[in-house]
Amino acid sequence: MTENKQIIAAEPLDQETIDKIKDGLLVRRQQIKEELKKITTADNKNDEPVKAKFPNYGNESDDNALEISDYTTNLATEKILQSALQDIESSLKRIEAKTYGICKYCGRPIGKQRMLARPSASACVECKTKLQKAL
């Protein structure tokens, strides 16, 4: 039995929707930057602009254990926030380049519903599904 899939073309994004998404991305970018400020410090020694703060709660063994636990949490949170920030910056660049909402693999529109649900999407559902199945 052969599988016969019909490709349904997604509706391209209109400028009003792009503007709405852009506004949301700018707000989220600012929120992430504020969150990063809370858990990181500037790092002038490395290429990375920030690094997770190591808390200092005291010299008791319980304090040290809590410091390590919080630092580990800060490292994971920093990684997640940096990744989200990178996705947002990439999306904003695609908006400026007028390529936002276009699948980077097949060149077709990604679709309004997907872009509203996941504003940093750079692939249509069909291409993303193919990529995930390949893994």
Image (tube, helix red, strand yellow):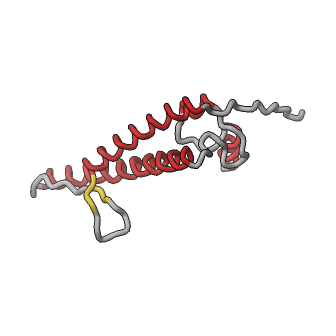
Residue ID at (41%, 48%):
80
Residue occupying image coordinates x 75% and y 32% = 9
Percent from the top left, x then y, of residue 48? Answer: 37, 63
Front position in the image: 135 or 90: 90
Q: Is residue 75 left or right of residue 2?
A: left
Identify which residue, 88 or 3, lies in the foreground: 88
Where does the image place residue 17, in percent across and percent down from the top left?
55, 30
Horizontal placement of 134 versus 89: left or right? right
**Residue most extreme to the right:** 1
Identified at 44% across, 46% down, the residue is: 84
Which residue occupies the foreground of this view, 14 or 53? 14
Quadrant into which the N terminus falls? top right
Q: Where residue 2 sits: x, y (%)?
A: 88, 35
Residue 62, placed above or below residue 12: below
Task: Identify the residue at image location x=13%, y=52%.
Answer: 57
Q: Is residue 108 left or right of residue 65?
A: right
The relative height of residue 7 versus residue 105 in the rendered view (above or below) is above
* Depicted 11 relative to depicted 100: above or below: above
Q: Position of residue 22 (x, y in %)?
A: 48, 38
Rendered position, 75 above or below 4 = below
Using the image as rendered, state which of residue 129 and residue 17 is in the foreground: 17
Q: Left or right? Give the position of 1 relative to 63.
A: right
Q: Quadrant of residue 49?
A: bottom left
**Outermost residue, left direction?**
59
Q: How many numbered discs?
A: 0
